[in-house]
Image (tube, grey):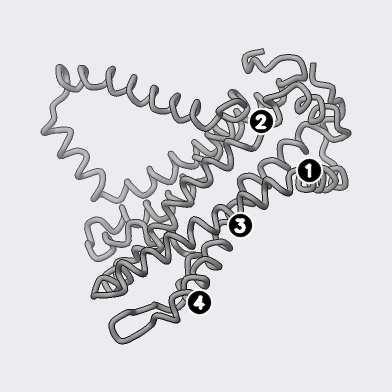
Amino acid sequence: MNTTVNQTFDWSRFTATLRKEVVENKRALLFTVICVYGFLTLIMILGNLVTGLGDGIYEAMETNTPQTFVASMLGLIICVSASLAFRNLTTKTGRTSMFTSPSSTLEKFLVNVLIYVVGIFVAFFACAQLADLTRIAVLSFFRSETFIVPGPINFLNSLSYIGSSLDGIEELSDVATGMKVGVWIGFIANAGCYLLGSIIWPRLSLLKTFAALYAIEIALFIIAAPLFYFFGDFQSMGLWFMEFITGGHFSTSIICVSAIQVVLYFSLAWYLFKRKDVISLKWWK
């Protein structure tokens, strides 16, 4: 059984638990941040080398390719980080250490969310800005009339560039707005999904959660495809979908669906984490 008795929230206990988690895992956390910084630096330098010798650099800057790439990488990194949040549950020693510490289950859960979800957002954008400055410092020695090295790029607003290509189309401006806001909420929802996966399957959580999502998508497709084929009117559905997109409902729908996913995933993750104990890893107990 879970040995944590006091399920209330106390700020001093929360900060003590936070310090404990950071100190005990500082090497792993530091290694993760260094890897993210190194990967972003390498990609940014290579990207500048490829596009800097011609007009490609101007096209990349006009289409906000660097910001879009960073936003895509954030989507990947946040899933990997969230899937590692409860890796201590993989061993009995780790479960014993977690569940016998003098802090409530709520405090333990919030600490992991703060470090591996909120913290990775902050650390990622810090690494992105530092990687961009490193790119400039390294490539500035090769700057010339034929090789262009753009100045610092602001990556803090990277997610707002997703869907920006639709801004000029009046009929699809609602879609662009929904994508910009929905992507932010969607990234948090993805983090919640993989956080849930790390509680259900502490071992190989990333792969198992991805496989589960893929299997669900395939199952839904197998069920929906015959129904649409035999009973669906594709022309009417296509007209309805286009009217739905251009009618001003798409943006609200994206935001609402993403928000529901956030609440669902984090609530379910919290509920299942409360049911964890030292002895068993079974999520249905």
Q: Amino acid at mark 4?
A: Ala
Q: Say above or below: 169 vs 93.
A: below
Give the residue displayed 52% in from the left and 41% down from the top. 79
Q: Which residue is mark 1?
A: 24
Residue type of the residue flagged with mark 2: Trp
Does residue 54 appear in the picture of this structure? yes
The numbered dot on residue 270 is 2
Check disc 3 and give the amino acid type.
Answer: Ala
Amino acid type, callout 1? Glu
**Mark 1 against mark 4, which lies toward the viewer?**
4
Few, some or many residues within 10 Å of mark 2 (<14, 14–19, 20+): some
On residue 186, the disc is none
Q: Nearer the viewer, mark 2 or mark 4?
A: 4
In the rendered image of this protein, does residue 237 appear above or below residue 117? above
* Label 2 vs 1, first from the N-terminus: 1
First in sequence, mark 1 or 4: give its number. 1
Q: Secondary structure at mark 2?
A: helix
Q: Is residue 247 left or right of residue 275?
A: left
The residue singled out by tag 3 in the image is 123
Kindly identify which residue carries mark 4: 137
Which quarter shows the C terminus? top right
CA distance for labels 2 and 4: 44 Å
Q: Give the Cα distance between marks 4 and 3.
A: 21 Å
